[in-house]
Amino acid sequence: MEKNEQAPERDLYALLHVSPDASDEEIRKAYRQWAQIYHPDKYQAPQMKDIATENFQRIRDAYEILSDENKRQIYDIYGMEGLNSGLELGPRLKKTEEIKEELERLKRRKEEERVFAHARPTGSIVANFSLPRYLSGRGIMKGMAMVSEVQSQVSKHNTVVIAGNLGVTDNAGAGAATALLRHQVSPVASIEFMATAGLRSLITIQTSRHISLHSTATAGLTISLRDGSVNLSNTWTRHLSEATVGNIQLVLGTESSIAVGWQKRDEKTSAAGEVKFGTSFFGTSGHYTHHFSSKSHGRVACRIGSTALEFEIGGGRRISNFSTIRMLYNIGIQGISWRFELHRGGQKLIIPTYIVKPYYLRRERQKALQNMEKSSVQVRETREAAKKAQRLLENVSNRKKNKQIAKDGLVITRAIYGNLKAIRVANEHGEVNDDVASQVLDVTLPLNFLVTEAGQLKLHEGIKKSGIMGFCDPCPDQPKQLLVEYTFGGHRCQVVVDDFDELLIPQAMHQF
């Protein structure tokens, strides 16, 4: 295991620019130094005041934790996770083993709370492979599709759902975005407003009502913005028993149809079936799942109709409290395929692989589900926050730099932090091109700010450098380095250090 995998991410120490072994006095001194820079009262312009307030709060939060002996001890052992989980040292928790046991218990509770939180993200990603395609020399990747959905209960009676999907097959692609507002009118009635934008732009209004203890009726109106067509739908659902539900759906419009279905679920089995007739199609489908134990299950499904003829068999196993894997074989007029599925919470990864060439391609393969976390928006936000923090350091940093220039002292001429490979490219070519720019961050200004009056700069060992004021993580979950070029005593110097390594300059070995 590499060093950066062993070391904890002590972002609070980086934020105050102190060593993990710093004394209480050193922590207080560092806090006072940063407070002088970021205190909101020092700025009059509203925009600058907002930036200062945000960064001052970060500094104050870090100081409140590191200046408290108990909180600091928990933070050093378990990081912010331990503090956020509610761990406290005292008569009940004195030993590290006791803290660890309590943390594990709280983590389990937090995980359960997270699953049932108001905001529930779900999604899937489908990577479609074809073995015959690969053998013919055209590449194994057939297409890819994804959908992500976030549902949030914004108030007691209102729920908002935001969803999007994107599919690509060969050189063709399609996508759509959907927004839905659900309002609970009363304990027995609700109404939904939904808008979809994409190849099919739609507006839908739907209302549901419990008409008896065991029955529910739903009516909907859908208008196409592309051609003005209108679809009306009505659904009646009734509980036939404690474990069985039946439903009838009628749709009138350009795609008129009638469907009759049922679902049954108990401790050991779940099953469903449907018969559907439309103006241009008909079909029936069903599936049966049997749970052999609390962890494993088998599944059989089939679809027969004017547009499909397929049979599916397979099974799955739960590998953790929130994760399940499935492997299924599908045999039909489209060919034979094998499918791997990973279900994690509300997320799915689906990898269908065609073993025998299908007779034709189905458009439905362009649809799928995915939760994408991640991260391009967050990276842009943290990069912007780092640039704002640098703006407040600029005046003091330039004064320090000019003093060092006047006495031929330590001056940071260039410093970039980010992806290890991108740093190597920048080091070899001496410049940051467009391909590298998105993977690194210029940190010349904050490093000049950290140069002491004696003309020295020290970054402590074991601290992730992205936590330093004016820094951010431009490439999460990737190994990072810091490249520093500086002058001292008329000599040009350069040094590259890993993310968690100590940096102490100037040093004669850095000259070139």
Image: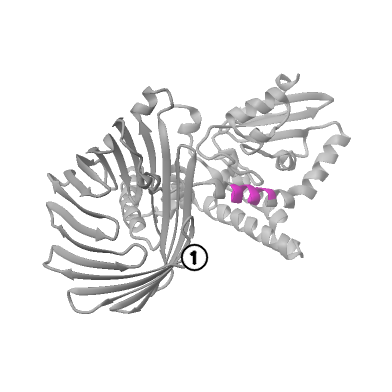
- Number of numbered discs: 1
Q: How is the image coloured?
A: one colour
SS at badge 1: loop
What predominant SS class does the magenta segment belong to?
Answer: helix
Snapshot quadrant of residue 314:
top left
Q: Which residues are magenta?
A: 380-387
- Position of the C terminus, as image quadrant, is top right
Residue found farthest to the front: 280
- The residue at 43%/26% (across/down) is 138
Residue 473, given in percent of the width and then of the height, sits at 58, 42
Residue found farthest to the right: 406
Rendered position, 221 above or below 498: below
Residue 456 appears in the rendering: no
Magenta span includes 391: no
- As rendered, which of 335 and 25 lies closer to the eye? 335
Residue 210, given in percent of the width and then of the height, sits at 24, 77
- Position of the N terminus, as image quadrant, is top left
Circle 1 residue = 225
- The residue at 38%/49% (across/down) is 369
Amino acid of disc 1: Leu
- Packing grade of label 1 (10 A; few <14, some 14-19, many >=20) is some
Residue 424 appears in the rendering: yes
Residue 222, given in percent of the width and then of the height, sits at 40, 68
- As rendered, which of 217 and 85 lies closer to the eye? 217
Rendered position, 376 above or below 257: above
Residue 443, given in percent of the width and then of the height, sits at 69, 39
- As rendered, which of 508 and 234 lies closer to the eye? 234
Magenta span includes 386: yes
